[in-house]
């Protein structure tokens, strides 16, 4: 079994034990074991299991060792299954409400007998939580907002999750022997941050054969509808997928039609009408006669336009830009030279500083920016002043050992409620860069939050504004503040805006990036990595940057090492 699934299983057992009201030390043991497994290498876990040495690892012990051996070697653990079956299913559903943890769910079950999301909502509407110990009117209000949020985003997936599922599905379709062409389409091809379903377009000389092949794939849980040109299914992962099948001649038209947003397609149809043409998924027609196009490039050429990248097809001005020759040369994955916003095991990261540095060298990066949490972030192991000094000493030693890699020492400093940063200036002045971020009191009144951010942006040591809107996709709305004011102040003070590439954030929103580019602000695409595997999230950020019209010159971490060092020294 993979270590991630093993760690997840241990984490869930900890949750189940809390829900059952077991001794808290017991659940903490499973949470601790989950962290321990996460920090292991895949091969290390397998070796320790096969050599029966897991029990010697700190935090595992004999009892957990037996359970882990059984799970890793067989892929099953009856204890886990029995524990899960003993808990009312509705309690697990209630855990999906933002801010509602196992203890509160258990309390609601014990005090009010609530066993489902519907019962919870009814109890809130009836004001039954107001008088409960540990709850109150504000908690009740937050729970109702959380339930509403869940319903609004039901059946939606993070872009990276949907993309992985879609790419695996694409690989399966390519096994069809009579396949001509196939491509992802829809919101995935446009790199939307949230995806509802998977769209694919294919061409073949055997359409009925392809739709039948698709419907019979092992990854398909249910066939919703099936014909010779379209098949809709629900996949095992719970997401729906639609496959459109056309002939080779129709393929470019279908691909364009099923890629663009409704608004983009409407705008293209309007352009076609002004030229005496008609377009749909089957072709471009003049007086009923179909025009020939062998690619999307030729499709756009019919309308006197250069190829418009799929990410831009949202009717955000891409057609006008194509017409006047001002489409951006979008940033590419290969343009990224280095990575910022990295957490190590000094705070809440998994890997050591040395492991991060060696990974960056292996991946061919020119530089890396270490920025663990600051002291106010006690929940994330925030660094004391002494911890920062120790980290600085280790970084100096690593710089000497690896002179071919730029290692910048920074911190992710909490922005306090009054807008001040988390350390005295004498501490901040020793660092190469500072990412200033809001992590607490996220729901401040609009003017107060605006003033808080403006105050932080005015600090001369602030290099970047981290995850600027504080949103969590499918989990939390953005903080309320005057974005226009924040952008202008960041520009005046030379502060770089972070595009946080964590798949649950993707913050900044792509809808703001075009304006940010026009203003001349710099953006840094940062993974907010807590383990080296998270570095690949940077490329999710590149997708969003492309969607937001960013070019290489708009992105700070496309700059070479020497330019980055000079920028920090100038700051």
Image (spheres, rainbow, N blue to C red):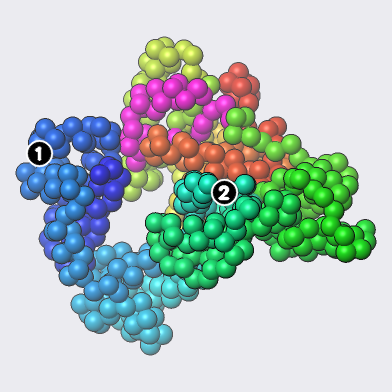
- Quadrant location of the C terminus in the rendered image: top right
**Real-space Cα distance between discs 1 and 2?**
53 Å
Element assignment for label 1:
helix
- Quadrant location of the N terminus in the rendered image: top left
Q: Residue at x 10, y 39 (%)?
A: 55
Q: Are marks 1 and 2 in contact (CB under 8 Å)?
A: no
Check disc 1: other Cα within 10 Å, few if <14, some if 14-19, many if 20+: some
| 262 falls in the magenta region | no
Residue 100 is left or right of residue 457, and the answer is left
Residue located beneath label 2 in the image: 178
Q: Nearer the viewer, residue 286 or 234?
A: 286
Check disc 2: other Cα within 10 Å, few if <14, some if 14-19, many if 20+: some
Q: Residue at x 30, y 45 (%)?
A: 4
Element assignment for label 2:
loop
Residue located beneath label 1 in the image: 55
Residue 514 is left or right of residue 6, and the answer is right
Task: State the image coordinates of residue 395 (x, y, percent, origin top left).
Answer: 40, 21
Residue 373 visible? The answer is yes
Task: State the image coordinates of residue 520 (x, y, percent, origin top left).
Answer: 74, 39
Residue 416 visible? The answer is no
Q: Residue at x 74, y 52 (%)?
A: 249
Task: State the image coordinates of residue 89 (x, y, percent, origin top left).
Answer: 27, 72
User: Where is 204 relative to 370, above or below?
Assistant: below
Q: Nearer the viewer, mark 1 or mark 2?
A: 2
What residue span does the magenta drawing correspond to? 336-365
């Amino acid at each position: 079994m993979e270590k991630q699934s093993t760690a997840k299983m241990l984490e869930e057992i900890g949750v189940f034990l809390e829900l059952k009201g077991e001794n808290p030390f017991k659940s903490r043991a499973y949470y601790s074991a989950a962290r321990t497994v996460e920090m292991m290498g895949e091969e290390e876990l397998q070796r320790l299991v096969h050599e029966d040495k897991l029990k010697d690892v700190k935090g595992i012990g004999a009892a957990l060792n037996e359970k882990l051996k059984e799970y890793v070697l067989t892929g099953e653990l009856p204890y886990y299954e029995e524990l899960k079956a003993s808990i009312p299913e509705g309690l697990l559903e209630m855990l999906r409400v933002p801010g509602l943890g196992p203890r509160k769910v258990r309390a609601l079950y014990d005090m009010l007998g609530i066993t489902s999301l519907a019962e919870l909502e009814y109890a809130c509407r009836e004001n039954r939580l107001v008088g409960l110990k540990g709850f109150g009117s504000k908690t009740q209000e937050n729970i109702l907002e959380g339930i509403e949020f869940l319903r609004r985003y039901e059946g939606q997936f993070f872009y990276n999750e949907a993309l992985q599922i879609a790419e695996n599905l694409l690989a399966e379709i390519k096994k069809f022997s009579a396949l001509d062409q196939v491509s992802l389409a829809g919101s995935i091809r446009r790199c939307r941050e949230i995806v509802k379903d998977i769209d694919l377009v294919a061409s073949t000389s055997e359409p009925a054969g392809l739709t039948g092949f698709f419907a019979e794939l092992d990854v398909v849980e249910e066939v919703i509808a099936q014909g010779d040109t379209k098949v809709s299914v629900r996949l095992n992962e719970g997401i729906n997928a639609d496959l459109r099948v056309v002939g080779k001649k129709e393929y470019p038209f279908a691909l364009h039609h099923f890629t663009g947003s409704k608004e983009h397609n409407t705008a293209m149809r309007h352009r076609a009408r002004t030229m005496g043409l008609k377009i749909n998924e089957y072709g471009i027609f003049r007086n009923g006669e179909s025009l020939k196009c062998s690619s999307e490039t030729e499709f756009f050429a019919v309308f006197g336009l250069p190829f418009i990248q799929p990410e831009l097809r949202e009717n955000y001005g891409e057609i006008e830009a194509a017409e006047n020759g001002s489409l951006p040369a979008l940033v590419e994955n290969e343009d990224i030279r280095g990575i910022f916003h990295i957490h190590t095991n000094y705070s809440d990261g998994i890997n050591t500083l040395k492991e991060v540095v060696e990974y960056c060298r292996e991946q061919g990066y020119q530089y890396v920016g270490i920025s663990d949490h600051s002291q106010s972030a006690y929940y994330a192991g925030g660094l004391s002043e002494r911890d920062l000094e120790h980290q600085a000493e280790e970084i100096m030693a690593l710089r000497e050992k690896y002179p071919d890699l730029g290692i910048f020492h920074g911190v992710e400093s909490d922005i306090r409620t009054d807008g001040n940063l988390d350390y005295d200036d004498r501490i901040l002045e020793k660092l190469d860069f500072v990412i200033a971020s809001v992590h607490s009191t996220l729901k401040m009144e609009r003017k107060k939050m605006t003033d808080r951010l403006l105050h932080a942006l005015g600090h001369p040591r602030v290099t970047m504004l981290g995850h600027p809107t504080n949103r969590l996709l499918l989990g939390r709305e953005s903080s309320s503040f005057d974005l226009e004011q924040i952008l202008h102040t960041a520009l005046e003070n030379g502060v770089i805006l972070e595009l946080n590439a964590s798949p649950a954030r993707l913050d900044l929103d792509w809808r703001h990036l075009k304006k940010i580019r026009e203003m001349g602000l710099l953006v840094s695409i940062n993974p907010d990595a807590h383990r080296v595997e998270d570095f690949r999230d940077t490329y999710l950020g590149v997708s969003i940057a492309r969607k937001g019209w960013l070019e290489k010159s708009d992105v700070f971490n496309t700059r070479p090492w020497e330019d980055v060092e000079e920028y920090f020294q100038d700051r």
